Amino acid sequence: MSTERVELSAPEMDCASCAGKVRTALEGVEGVTSIDTRPTTGVAVVDYDPETVSVDTLIARVEAAGYEVTDTEGRITAGGDVWTTPRAYKAYAGAVAMVLGFAIGFGPVSNPLLFDVVRETTLSEALYVLGAAVAGAPVVRAGYQSAKLRELDIDLLMGAAIIAALGVGYYVEAATLAVLFSLAELLEAHAMDRTRESIRELLALSPETATVKRDGGEESVPAASVKEGDVVVVRPGERIPVDGDVLAGTSAVDESPITGESVPVDKTEGNEVYAGSVVEGGYLEIEASAAGDETTLSRVIDLVEQAESRRTDAERFVDRFAGYYTPTVVTAALLTIFVPPLLLGGAWGTWFVRGLTLLVIACPCAFVISTPVSVVSALTSAARNGVLVKGGDHLERMGEVDTVAFDKTGTLTTGDLAVTDVVPAAGRDEGSVLRAAAAVEQYSEHPVGQAIVDHATEAGVDAPDATDFENLAGRGVRADLSAQETYYVGKPGLFEELGHDLGHAHVRTDGGVAVETPDAPDCAQPGCVDLRAGTIADLQSAGKTVVLVGTETELVGVVAVADTVRPEAKRVIQALDDAGVRTVMLTGDNERTARAVADSVGIDEARAELLPEEKLDAIEELLAEGTVAMVGDGVNDAPALARADIGIAMGAAGTDAALETADIALMADGLDGVPYCLRLARKANGVIKQNIGASLAVKLLLAIGAPFGYVTVLVAVLVGDMGMSLAVTGNAFRLGRVEPEE
């Protein structure tokens, strides 16, 4: 069976009970294979069999549940001004009727008898009924939809309560409930729309049109229609519509919408740029490297939207609790209405109002929405600051991290490696060392290999062709040169495995590295040295990576490569240390180099000379001691990132693999996002706990007080429903103000 996916936008689906009704409406449709409802974005993602069911049928089922579908592409659309909708006007009209009823019934104005059929009905009572009917009609209609779908939700509870109050003649309570609940729903819809606005702000970063050079002129086209290879023109002050490479022009570009970096970056011919960035002062011609609808920004937005479906432990707890809470309180409400009058001789009116109040309290909306709004607020805040968190569960887990493991090359260091020293063996010169090393490394993707090839090219050394290249994982590389002899380039340990005695080697003493190299014992030949204790040790102690070049029988020479520690690394490690987080460096480099880098940035624990599988073992050991985040480049470190509780990839704006494999992606090529993400995640976890705890405590107090008459319908709506929903939403919005430290 082949399946297709459709994303139905239903802006009015803005609460957990709304999402439940949409899910229930779709679950009964043959051919639907999966449903993911996202109330915080107002989108229902449906996988279905197109041979069994059509999209029109799916739309009809959602709209039959009471929610208009505005499009089938999952756009997060603005619901319009909630205060000017037909439902809002009905709430206002009901409120006016109710207030007039209060003024006539309790004020100095005459309250005439209108008619005496079945019971006497005054003008004020008629106004109460009118207010309840006008404001409560949408509530009762939604409750009817819930009843058809067998959903015990807030609409069904409130609709039943309004009808019951009218039926037994409690017009004041009916009007109060209908008007206040309608106003509460409008306030909650407004709060949810503010939550969606944070995602719409991300969408607004990408321009809708692009200026493309075609047929000798310029043409304005929809940005989504730009194809790979098209040349796009961007003028000062305009946003770049596509990812691409600069063909002509120079300008400072504000990349903060993508990377979170506030300082503009100078761009010129050959530089990479991203959609959503702003050209500040120059003119650029850009060749699109991807289609207009496949930009880095669009992928980020898609991943932020999808992240809502990854539920946190807190959300799962709340859903389980709500499944027991609502039926329990509804049962208590019915017992409150019937047991005291029937068994204890209580007054029906008194106990009916108390039971009605409990029905209002039975709504779990406040604590059901407490977690999703917090998660969406945090995820969109992170995205605006160049950090992509790919799910609420990852955010929650990041807040629990007590150990952060860093790779060295390209993570704590810039990864811009350069050859600093070439030490030829006796009878060789630097050119022959570089020629052999570059011949083997030209097929390697490792940064050290690329540095050697680049240095050979700059030195004018032509590397011969090589065959049968093989990567010796974690140790080096080898290949056959034109003479059909196998050459190796790799760590000192690799050459010891080949049988070389590094304590007794012959190197030229008239050139190369200027370090003190002790003579090897018991050898009278010139240039006989202890490489291991001399040249290699001194280079490594200087923080350099040392590789040897040679065959199984001959050592050709030594090459040293150096990297630069990132300027922010020490500051980031200090911030993590201040937060009580343990930091560890995992690297395949040698012990001395690893220690030199670790000491320079303030990391106490460095584990060196690790093969890829040994990095996994190291992560396993750390996991046994706590919650671990691994920071790397997202490509070479993919296994370790996947094994850690949280995998954090750097420089993800230019790396598709990092966006796909990491749990958290730092869009900028820097480490500042790590402590920021930790602070945001910890604050988000705190806000979620506050929201759940406060909403549960308030509901519990109200539920205890209602049967004893301490809680009125007015208090139940204003505090237990509307008040707490607004409180948890407002508390969640505080996460949007968490910014990276300067």
Image (spheres, rainbow, N blue to C red):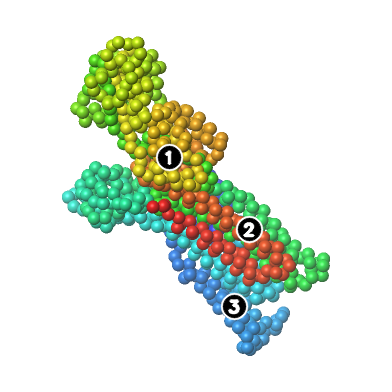
Q: Nearer the viewer, mark 3 or mark 2?
A: 2
Residue lying farthest to the left in this orientation: 216
Q: Nearer the viewer, mark 2 or mark 1?
A: 1
CA separation, marks 2 and 1? 44 Å
Residue at 34% across, 31% down:
542
Q: How many marks?
A: 3
Residue at 35% across, 47% down:
295
Q: Which numbered disc covers residue 98?
A: 3
Q: Report which residue position mark 2 lands on.
A: 696
In the image, residue 113 above or below residue 721: below
CA separation, marks 3 and 1? 68 Å
On the question of residue 74 being in view, the answer is no
Callout 2 secondary element: helix
Q: Which numbered disc covers residue 602?
A: 1
Q: Which numbered disc covers residue 662?
A: none
Could you classify mark 2 by the number of other residues whose Cα lies within 10 Å: few (under 14), some (14-19), or many (20 or more)?
some
Callout 3 secondary element: helix
Q: Earlier in the sequence, mark 3 or mark 2?
A: 3
Tell me where residue 252 appears, x and y as whole percent: 26, 51
Tell me where residue 377 appears, x and y as whole percent: 48, 55
Quarter-of-image position of residue 127 = bottom right
On the question of residue 349 being in view, the answer is yes
Kind of residue at badge 1: Gly
Q: Earlier in the sequence, mark 3 or mark 1?
A: 3
Kind of residue at badge 3: Met
Kind of residue at badge 2: Leu
CA separation, marks 3 and 2? 31 Å
* Viewer-closest of 733 and 581: 581
Tags 2 and 1 in contact by the CB under 8 Å rule? Answer: no
Residue at 26% across, 18% down:
508
